[in-house]
Each structure stands twice: as C-alpha cells, then as structure tokens.
Amino acid sequence: MVFNSLIFLAFLAVVLPVYYRLPHRAQNWFLLFASWFFYGWWNVWFLGLLWFTSLFDYFCAHWIERTENPRRRKWLLAGSMTVNLTVLGVFKYFNFFADSAVNLLGAFGFHADVPTLRVILPIGISFYTFLSMSYTIDVYRRELKATARLVDYQLFVCYFPHLVAGPIVRASYLLPQCEQPRVIKSEQVVNGIWLILLGYFKKVVLGDRLAQAVNWGFAGHAAPLADANAWLVIYAFAFQIYADFSGYSDIARGLSKLMGFELVENFKSPYLVTNPSDFWRHWHISLSTWLRDYLYISLGGNRLGRLRTYLNLMLTMILGGLWHGAGAAVFLWGFF
C-alpha cells in the first residue's frame, strides 16, 4: 500500500475517525494493528520477518539493560546486530551476489547452469532495520531505558507513516510519544494538512510527471551525455528523486501531526546549499545523522587523527551508498 493510492485513502478514512474516538492505550493497539494491515497489504508473509526482528531486538534490549557484565552486554549487542544485518544482507544483497558469482564463473569459462533462488526484497526493510538497531544500541550505551510495554515498542517500529519510506526516527524521540497520551492541537492539524497537500503535490504533480521523462531517457532513448536530451534527463532525475522522497516524508509528517505525533524533518532545501558537506546535512537528514551517530562516531569519528578521520568518512559514505541497494554503481557513488 502506497500513500498515493486510492486504497490508502480508503484505509485512512477508516483509521482516523476510529483513532480519534479511542483512549490512549486503545489508540496504540489500534494503530499497531492498522500498521500491520498497511504493511501486510503488500505481502502478508513479510509480516513474520518484521515481527521476528522487532521482537528479537525488544528482548535483547531488556537483557542488555538487566545485565551488568560488560562482556555479556557486548555479546548481546553483537547478537542483535548480527541478526539484523544478516536479515538485511540476505534479503537485500543475495540476488546481487548470486548473479555476480555466475557472471564471474562465466568470465573464467565456467558455465553455471544451476537454479538460483530469487529472494524478494521486503519493502521498507532498510528503514525498520535501522530503526530497531538504533534502539538496541541506545539501550546498550545507557542513553535510553528499555521500554516496558511491548505494544509501545512495536508501534514505534511498525508505525505506518514512517514504516516503508522513513524518516528513520530514533527511539528516544518517538517512543515517549507512544508511551504518553497524545494531545492533538488545532495548530498541529492545520500544519499536518498543509504538509500532506505539499507532499502529494511533490509526489504526484512533480515526481510522477518527471518520471515519464526519466524513464524515457533511461530506457535508452537519450545517448549518455551526447546531447541536450541526456542532460535534461539527468536533471529531471535529480528533481524526481527529491520530489518523490521528500514528498513521502512530508506526507508521513503530516499524517503524524493529525494523530498527535511529531516526526523529524527529513529534507531542508538540499539543492539550495553551496557545498557537499551542507548537502548531507539537508538531504535525507534522518539517514545522514543515523550514519554519523551510529557508524562514523562508533568508528572513532575525528578523534583519532586526520588519516583515520578520512578513513572513517570514506567507510561511512560507502556503506551509506550500499544502504541504497546492491551493485557497483551505489558502491562507487558512495566512494565518490
């Protein structure tokens, strides 16, 4: 189910009136089941994967909090990271490595005539995996207490506005909003409606229209960098991905405001900045800050000398590239 579909609007027409009539605890249960329905509409079998990873991290975080032994705490954190990254790696990168192995064998004259399992990529897996991992890491760092109520934690992970396209919201930011009763203010509603309208304008009017030119060019109708058409396609693609992605983020934030939640701002006019460093502070902010706080700083940040700082930056951006998908193109893009 995607935001710009009639079925989603029908889903919302049911969810909002019921949500407003319920008390706080019932709201959380209702939103959780609504979020599962929203996710399961695409493929109900992948709900099992979502439940498995989120439950595993929920109990891992509780065990980490109750354990004082530093070695055992590290092993529990390592277990959580291993499970999350293994699940993400198998579903996101299995097909790439399987195809690469076949191509490599072919280059050396070996014919690999074996059936290959095609793994379907669960929608939103990168987002909810990072979301869940940040919770366990924060509990391990003693920056956050493990939440007592499973329903609150599940709602934090599965909350449908951010589930499939972000933003990647920290537990320290969203969990308290799940745990405490929400008061919906008139200003929130007005701002939420404007954000939703802006998001749909970006996505449907700009993004979807630009996609027609982009798909035409990428289908081979425009020779690479040969004429004006190719350059128009390149710039159309730049604005298409901005309109698509920021539009989804605006809709997610607007919907959340209608229900009394606040999500982080994900884009701040990134194409108006003047240098690459500022660009990454304004583009997909929730991912950039996640990579900074949980990867770059964990690697040592800028505390270990200039050479190590550059290495940490390089590794962070390469892994940030690979987060977007499997292939040489995203690896080189991150490297660049």
Image (cartoon, rainbow, N blue to C red):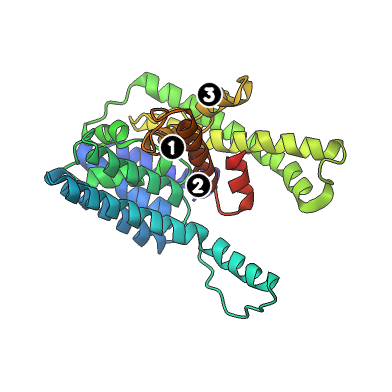
Question: Who's the residue at 66% across and 78% down the image?
Answer: 110
Quarter of the image for the C terminus: give it. Answer: top right
Which residue corresponds to mark 3?
Answer: 268
Residue 335 percent location from the top left of the image: 59, 41
Q: Residues within 10 Å of mark 3 (few under 14, many from 20)?
A: some
User: Where residue 323 is drawn, which disc sits there?
Assistant: 2
Q: Nearer the viewer, mark 3 or mark 1?
A: 1
Callout 1: SS: helix
Question: What's the residue type where badge 1 is placed?
Answer: Leu
Question: What's the residue type where badge 3 is placed?
Answer: Lys
Per the model, the C-alpha gap separating discs 3 and 2 is 21 Å
Nearer to us in this view, 325 or 236: 325
Image quadrant assignment for residue 134? top left
Residue 61 percent location from the top left of the image: 22, 46
Image quadrant assignment for residue 133? top left
Residue 157 percent location from the top left of the image: 33, 45
Question: Who's the residue at 53% across and 43% down the image?
Answer: 318
Closer to the N terminus: mark 3 or mark 1? 3
Nearer to us in this view, 98 or 204: 98
Q: Is residue 176 visible?
A: yes
- Marks 3 and 2 close (CB-CB < 8 Å): no
Question: What's the residue type where badge 2 is placed?
Answer: Trp
Per the model, the C-alpha gap separating discs 3 and 1 is 18 Å
Which residue corresponds to mark 1?
Answer: 291
